[in-house]
Amino acid sequence: MVILGLTLFAIAGAQTTNGSTGTTLRTVKPPAPPKAECAKGAICFSGTVSRESGFAWQISPELDFILKPGWTITVVPHLTTAGCTDDLSWPLTWPVQEHNGRYIDETYGWTAEQEVDTTPREFLFLTNCSDYKTAYDLYIKGDVGRLAALHHGSGRLWITNSKISHVHDTNDNKSGEIESMEFSVEILLPVAK
């Protein structure tokens, strides 16, 4: 809840107690929005998305950064690359098959507030489909220790502003929804082989 630029958080041992509910509240200033960085030689860009919309940015002639609706950070071959549509960030951004930095989606028990507060989000990605196939095979064989040796790039996404709603919360699910967010991205491509 925001009142006159101040945020109220329910925490134990704070200053004010609501007698009817016993909830203890403390008034604190909200944290400053995170400041995105752009390292020398990095590809940097910003965007805005609203619920159910996505975002795409071509980061090289071969690769696209896509924030898929829902939202999931992906790096995929550019549309002109025939026959390969795999998410090249999946095999290298751990933990796989659990919540990780690629997911901004209120899943795995995360609330909307936790999602937007977790910033920057870091991810790795392969740069071609051949390495993706190798990574997939290593993952299936359980030989994940060799994944780091594959040619890869890295990225960070900062959520710089967001709007959260709890209008669809139920008694069983109070995770909220991210209605919209502004973000900045830094991509570091690997040096050519």
Image (cartoon, rainbow, N blue to C red):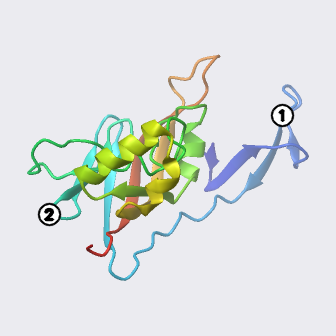
Q: Is residue 187 above or below residue 144?
A: below
The part of the image, by quadrant, that contains residue 109 is: top right
Residue neighbourhood size for the residue with mark 2, other residues' Cα within 10 Å, grouped as few (<14), some (14–19), many (≥20): few
Marked residue nearer the N-terminal end (1 or 2): 1
Left or right of 42 in this view: 169: right
Which of the image's four quarters has the C terminus?
A: bottom left
Residue 61's disc number: 2
Q: Secondary structure at mark 1?
A: loop
Residue in view at x 51 percent, y 60 percent: 120
Residue neighbourhood size for the residue with mark 1, other residues' Cα within 10 Å, grouped as few (<14), some (14–19), many (≥20): few
State the image coordinates of residue 39 (x, y, percent, origin top left).
41, 78
Would you say residue 90 is visible in this rendering?
A: no
Marks 1 and 2 sit apart, C-alpha to C-alpha, by 55 Å
Residue in view at x 60 percent, y 44 percent: 114
Q: Is residue 84 above or below residue 173?
A: below
Residue 85's disc number: none
Of circles 1 and 2, which is in front?
Answer: 2
Most extreme residue toward the bottom is: 40
Residue occupied by mark 1: 23
What type is the residue that disc 1 sits on? Thr
State the image coordinates of residue 62 (x, y, percent, origin top left).
17, 59
Which of the image's four quarters has the N terminus?
A: top right
Q: How many marks?
A: 2
State the image coordinates of residue 142 (x, y, percent, origin top left).
51, 40
Q: Is residue 112 above or below residue 42?
A: above
Name the residue nearer the viewer: 130 or 102: 130
Name the residue nearer the viewer: 123 or 27: 123
